[in-house]
Image (cartoon, helix red, strand yellow):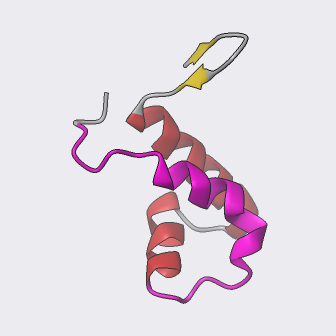
Amino acid sequence: MVVTPDSIEMTRGEIRERIDTSARKRRGVSGDELLRQYRDGELANPGDVADLLALADLIDPDSDGR
């Protein structure tokens, strides 16, 4: 992670790790499971994890994870 006065830069892997860690603490599920539930319309109270969903939107699906 690179932090400057104006921005924070995270790799795809760092974003996925942040989502996974937070999802496990808040919901007791992996980050992948949290995102699957959201995509499938099964996620209860998505507003409670809106920050994680916003992070997921930053991941470039064509990225190699770096």
**Quadrant the C terminus occupies:** top left
Q: Residue furthest front?
A: 6
- 10 in relation to 62, above or below: above
Q: Residue at 69% across / 85% down in the picture?
A: 44
Q: Residue at 58% across / 68% down in the picture?
A: 29
Q: Is residue 5 magenta?
A: no
- 22 in relation to 18, above or below: below
Residue 62 falls in image quadrant: top left
How far across and how far down the image is residue 1, in percent? Answer: 55, 19
How far across and how far down the image is residue 42, in percent? Answer: 55, 89
Left or right for 53, reference 63: right
- 13 in relation to 36, above or below: above
- 4 in relation to 60, above or below: above
Residue 6 falls in image quadrant: top right
Q: Residue furthest right?
A: 48
Left or right for 26, reference 11: right
- Say which of 13 and 21 sits in front: 13
* The residue stretch that appears in magenta: 40-63
Q: Is residue 45 magenta?
A: yes
